[in-house]
Structures are given as structure tokens and as C-alpha cells.
Image (cartoon, grey):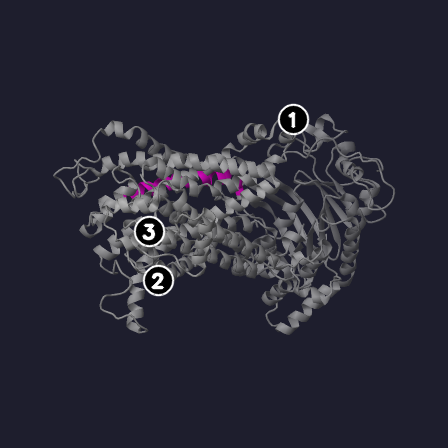
Amino acid sequence: MKIKIGFGILVFFALMALVGPLLIGADPAATSEDGLQGPSAEHWLGTTQTGQDILTQIVYGARISMGVGVLSAVIANLLAILVGLVGGYFGGAVDEVLSVLTNIFLVLPALPLIIVLAGYLPQRGVGSVAVVIAVTGWAWGARVLRAQTLSVRRRDFVQAARASGEGPLRIIFFEIMPVLLPVIATSFLATVVAAILAEAGLSFLGLADLSTVSWGSMLYFAQNGQALLIGAWWWFIPPGLCIALIGTGLALVNFGIDEIANPRLRTVKVKVRKART
Amino acid sequence: MRFLARRLGFYLLTAWAAITLNFLIPRLMPGDPVELLVARMKGNVEPEAIDAMRRAFGISDASLWQQYLDYLGNLARGELGRSITFFPTEVSTVIADSLPWTVALVGVATLISYLIGTSLGVLMAWKRGTWLDGVLPAATFMHAVPYFWVALALVFVFGVTLQWFPVSRAYGLDVMPGMTGEFAASVLYHAALPAITIVIASMADRILGMRNVMVTTLGEDYVVMAEAKGLTSRRVMWAYAARNAILPNITSFALSLGFVVGGSVLTEIVFSYPGIGSMLLKGVENEDFPLMQGIFLVISLAVLVANFLADLAYVVLDPRTRQESE
Amino acid sequence: MNVLEIRDLGVDYLSQTGAVHAVADVSLDLRRGEILGLAGESGSGKSTLANAVARLLRPPAAITSGSVVYHRQDGTAVDVLALKRDELRAFRWKELAVVFQSAMNSLNPVSTVGAQIDDVLRIHAPKMSRKDRAERAVELLQRVGISADRRRSYPHELSGGMRQRAAIAIALALNPEVIIMDEPTTALDVVVQRDILHEIRALREEYGFAVVFITHDLSLLMEISDRIAIMYAGRVVETGTAEALHRTPRHPYTLGLLRSFPRLHGPREELLGIPGTPPDLRSLPPGCAFHPRCGRAMEECSTRLPLLTRGADGADGADGSDGEVACLLNGGRGVEEAS
């Protein structure tokens, strides 16, 4: 049930990002005379100070926000897979070094590091922002994958592959990785949300490409346009809500998976018949 | 105390990594930071500033190794270079002025959030199947909410609409800083909304984390045995179940600190709170690289110290870590 | 003279797909001061039965039928299943204590052994002073062979055998009438196991409590128990004195169990075991649940559920045994051959 709701939310936002702009067609940056209008039949979610339609911005913003999220999650997970699987498989000194590296990146506060890195970027396009976020966000996945690899490594089929003389890289990527796909999938989804949050934070600081519309940059303009003081709640509520909803969808999927793995977590609702006394 | 020694070693290593990263970033990123800065400021920089910056970055014709040693030497003397925004003030001075505000705000708020969130998680696990389960969906939603968005919402509702709380600064313009009750009251009053923001935004993680660990712990034999011993539910819940569940929870709490600090930085910005987060924004706005880097370094070290404190708490709470190898 | 009477007890594990009968129609008596052995493979419901008696079942497990009556020494009868919360708290440990399977897991890892005795005393004997409680803790520990200075040790600082002794000391704290011991020696090596069995017998002589001793190891039960009940798929299939069961087991399953385990001492016997695996409680075979694994099964066994009936002959003869068996063989008398 939880998984279904979670997937429902994620699919909804994925469709919004992929198909939404085609359906709406309007230009999210287009200004109009109707500045700072509350929600109405014409503008479902109202307008910004310069008369841009918020709904249009949300739909187009989904593309950038989720695009950055997915792109950096892909990069981060490639790093995580590489570090986690290689360390977990080889063990020994290689593992020691990679583990320490992972733990260091796990402890260092990501956002300040992202801010510093982004500050140095000559151009802050979608791609480079995604890379910067990925560089600071791979450690968690690597840690989980390493732990899993350690246990998979001892399984029979891996031992058999090794005995039959398969090379280590082949074993890692063709024997072990397929088994870990569910773990990789959950780690991927978690990284997507973390990256969306990071991108929103960067944009909110004005450190991302402000000429493109993302949920973070909407919040940046809402804050700088004094949306709060004017009382334009429709301007800043929707972008944050979208971010939180994606996070909720992902969390529901992950909880669902956890509960399958650990039945104790389930909320039991069975009527206990009273004992005959 | 081998456990603590090992952790301390790891934090020293991480501190070194942060320091080295700080040194490498300007050199690894494409382009010369100083030229980048001059270009962005369109020549509006004083020559002394450019010179100070070169020195701050340690960018010179010396070998990379020599530059690194110079950099470490400066750091050892507490020199982080001069801020461009507040030229010619030292970065270390800027940080020293703003850090106490952040440490107090984030420290207290994180502690409150930890206490409330963990207790709620304990109760929710204990009273599974009751109305408390209703908190779960809310917590699930809150756990992915951006801090600064919560801040915006609180400012809108309690600051602008209801006007219950001030929405910016750390204390009123009408009070003089000093050891007076009036000043303290003003500080608390101004810290209320930012603190509530951090509590709300970070609490969901604590609730969900503690609930899950606690549910697993409730199935342990020692909890069943405590119940069989006829102890009061209160004692079973806290002294047996929660007391054990808190251990893995401390570890995950320590790991989440970096995230909390990141969120708090953005929270400060919404409230123009004169802490390190607002300074970071100033640094960003003015392309003040020395300031940005100095702040990154200080935040990293602060998170490491907090992690070490969490480890100390762990050692106090878990007798198994105190075992000396005989 | 019974201290505990279990009648027609049923425990179900409730799930969305329906109820699983983990314990069905179990009736057992525990006599004052006796050691009653409860044996069966894992999943036979023996631990569930013990937890039901101590009212320790957690959802989705629930008692669905039957009664458990406890008789105090003064003759008053207590309906255990009807106890209210506070009454239940007092009943637990003052009158019934439990020693769990693995002391490593049943002792609180973050609290000293002394503290774990102390909190029982503090709750149940509020009039005792701190000093009296400390003295009592030392006394209990010494009684089970743990030196006084170990009072301040944490569970991880003790050996497996010491931990189990500590768990027994905690169980003794309030001089209970009944102690349920759920596989108390399974995780220990044979020598330590022997020591602890002796200890339990000696303590029983001294304090006079009754024991329900649960294990899958029948030969071990033979050594320690006065009477034994054998469980299979949630039902009691045979009861009898240890001696009678050893000499003339009546249920084919008991016979199989007897041949499964080497004796603790004495000549090694051939491990015949029982073919097949324990049944899936979600889909029990009709009739006698054991018939698919039984070499002696008749056609009737797959249709008719045998009920526990008193053995017709020698089993309850000279030694005063009143053994029962649930088997259709030989007109309900079960196997008729010596083990």
C-alpha cells in the first residue's frame, strides 16, 4: 500500500516533468500585466510580481529540479557503486582506503562544500551544478553498497565464479551488481531527493543558473521579491510543497521496502479476540 | 578507551582532509580564482584586495608543495586571509563574530529537536496501533521539507500575518548588547522562529529513526524478560527498550548533523540571523572566496567536534565500548 | 496439588490470510515442586505455550481459547488469563518467573547484573532498603555460583554459562512457585550444560519451586524431568513420567525423538531421526499431523484426529504414572514396543 502511494507520487512528478511542459506550452518566463494575483480560474496558482504564471513555472521547474536531481543521482550512484563494490569485494588495504574516504565524505557537511564548489564554477549550468552535488553526495550509497557487497561476496555463486577463474571486474559487475540492484535502486531514489534539496538550496542562495526556472529559483525570487511581506503565499508554497511531496513519495517507497524486509516494523491491525475466561 | 582513540584518529584524518580540500579547491577548479573574481567585479576591486587575496589563497610562483606548507602554517596561526566583503577585516574575525550566534542557535535547536523527536519516536513505537500512528504520515512528509521553506512559511504565518514574532535580526534595535535581562529576552524572542524552524525541519528524521530502531528493540528478549519481570511499563519502555535503542540512534544522529547544519545555514539567511550562514550568503553574493572557504572550514570542524561529542555520549551509554582489551 | 492447570489452551497467529493455530487444545498439569519437561522440534508450539502461560504473547499471537489456573499455596485459585494489568505485574516474577532461551539476549546489555536483580526487588518488595537489596543480590548470585564482585559486571563481561546462571539468579529473586525455563542450556557446551542442570535440580530441592523445562533435546529432559510432555504441531501428543517415556514411548514421534539424540552420557546410539521436516502450520495435514512422517501410519491416521487418552496398561501401573498418548495405533494405545 505504502509502496503504491509512493510510486504514485513519484510517477506523477515524473510525468509532470516529462510531459507537463508539452501540455502547457506557455513560456514560464513570460511576464504579463497581472502581477501578484492570487489563485484564480485564469492563473490556478496565481502569478509572480512580474505576472509570470506560477503553475507554468512549477511544471517547467519540475524539469530542471528533477533533471538536476536525477542527473546528479546517476553520477553519485556510479561513484557509489564503484567505491562500494570495489572496496567491499577486494577488502584489505583497498577497502581500508576507500572506507576512510567514504566516511570522510559522510561526515563533512555537504551543503557548505557544495556552496564553496559552486562559488568557483565559471558557469553554473545544470550539468556543472549536478556534478558538484554528486561529488558531495555519493558517500551514503557507497557505505550501504560496501556492506552489502561484503555479505554477497561470501555467497556460493560468487565463490564459484572465482573458482572458475573469472576476473574480479567481471565478478563485481556481472555477478555481484545484479544481486544488489534493489539496494542500488533505493539508494538512487534517496540520492535524487537529496540532490533536489541541494539544488533548491543552491538556487535559493542564487548560486545556480537563475535564468532557468527551477523550484529553488522560484523560491529565490519569491524571497527577493518580498513575497512574504506582500502576503503572496501562493508564490512560495507550491515549490516547497512539490519538493516535500517528492521526498514523501520516495520515503513511502523506501519504508514499504523496509517493511517487507523487516516485518516487525509493520503496524499490526488485527482484531484480537478476547480469550474465553 | 580504544574506541575513542580510534574515533579521534578518524576525526583528525577528516579534519586534515577538509583542510587539504580547502587548499585544493581553488587550484583544481577551472580558471584562476583571482582573475575570475576581478572579471566578475568588473574591475571594482581595490588593488590591495587583489593582493590580499593572492596571499590568502597562497597563490604564488612557489611549488605546489611549498604553497601547501605556507597554507598550513598560516592556518596554524589562525590566519584565514582577509575578507573581501569586509575588507580589510580578517576572515577569522568575521567568523569569530558570527560563530557564537550560530553555535547557540543551532546547538540549542538541535538538542531540543533531538529530545522531542527521540521521545516521540519511543512513544510511537511503544503505542503502535493507537492514534499516535497518525504522526507517521506527517513525519514522513516533514522529513523531506527544505529548511528554508519551513522558515518562509513560519515567517509568513507568525511573523507577517500574526505578527507574534520578529522575522529578522538576533535582537531588537532598541536594546543594547550586554549582560542585561532585557537583552537576553530580546535575543530569545528573536531566536524563537529560527529555532522552531530547525526543530520542525530536523525532528521528523529523529522521530522516524528512533521509531524504527525502537520497534526492532521491542522484539528483543531482554525487553520481553523485563515485561516478564513484572516491571512497570514505564520502566520497560525507558530503562530497557529506549535505553538500548538510543545507541544506534546516536550514530545516525551524528551522521545527520552535517545535513542539519546545511539546513540551518539557509534558515539563518531567511531570518537575516547574524550567524555564519548569513555570512556565507554575503560571501557568496560578493564572490568573497576567502570568507566562503573559511566558513566551510569552520563548519566542517564544528561538525567533527559535534560528532566526537556524540561518540563520547555513546561511550558513556554503552558499557560494551568501555571494555579494555585484556 | 497442581500448581498450574492448563485447559484446552489455543493460541493463534492472526494474519490477513487467516489464523495459524500455533497451540491447539493443550491441557497440562504442573504439580507443586515437580520438573515438567516440554519437548518438541522448533515450531511445535512449546515456546508459544510457555509465553501464553506467562501472558507474554505479542500480536499477532493471541490466546483464542482455554484457561490457565494457578493455585496459590493457601489454596486460592487464580485465573491467569483474566488478571488485570497490576495483578498480572504482581503475578509475574513473584509467583511465576521465566528463564529465557539465550541469556546473552535476555539480559539487558547496558545494565549490570546486580542492577537487573535490584529492579525486580525494588518493584516487588518496595519495603526493602537499598542495603538489603544489595545483600539479597549478592546472596542470589552466590547461590548460583557467581562471586559477589560480579554484581557490578555487565552481561558481556560474563561467560555464557555465568550469564545463564545470572538469569537463573534473577528468576529466584522473589522465590516464585513456578519457573518456566525455555531452552536454558541450548547455547552452552555440554560440560557447562551439565553443571547448570545439576544446579537447577539442587535449587529445586532447596526452594521447592516447580519448573516447566522446555527443550528440543529429549534425552536431556529424561535426565532432569519428573514428567514429560511431547508436543507436535501445536498439540501435546504424549505425556508420561520420564521413566515411562524412556522405557515405553507410545507415540511414534516420541520414539523418533528418542532415537534422534545421543545421550549426554552412556553409549552412543544410532541416530535414526525422523524423516521429513516439521509441518507447515499454515497447512497442516488432515488427521494426525504427524502421519506423513510416520512409518506406522494407517489409512485412518490421515482422516481422524487422535485425542490425548490415558494409556490402557502398564504405563500407568506400578510407578504411578498416568501417561497419555494421542495416537490411533493399537486402538489408541500407541506404539507397543520398547525403545
- Seen from the viewer's position, the closer of residues C162 and C24 is C162
- Seen from the viewer's position, the closer of residues C286 and B222 is B222
Q: Label 3: chain?
A: B
Question: Relative to residue B217, is residue A177 depicted above or below?
Answer: above
Q: x%, y% of residue B136?
A: 41, 47
Q: CA distance from mark 1 to mark 2?
A: 62 Å
Tell me if residue A1 can be seen: no
Count residues near mark 1 (Cα–Cα under 10 Å), then give few for <14, some for 14-19, many for 20+: few
**Quarter of the image that includes the N terminus of chain B:** bottom right
Which label lies toward us, 2 or 3?
2
Q: CA distance from mark 3 to mark 1?
A: 53 Å
- Identify the residue position indicated by label 2 in the image: B93
- Identify the residue position indicated by label 3 in the image: B266
Q: How many marks?
A: 3
For label 1, the SS is: loop
Question: Relative to residue A166, is residue B51 depicted above or below?
Answer: below
Give the residue displayed 75% in from the left and 46% down from the top: C228
In the picture, measured across the screen, residue C207 lies left or right of residue B168, that is right
Q: What mark, if any, has residue A165 been given in the picture?
A: 1
Sooner in the amino-acid sequence: mark 2 or mark 3:
2
* Location of residue A131 (image quadrant): top left
Which label lies toward us, 1 or 2?
2
**Pointers 2 and 3 within a single chain:** yes
Q: x%, y% of residue C129?
A: 62, 73
Question: Relative to residue C48, is residue C157 depicted above or below?
Answer: below
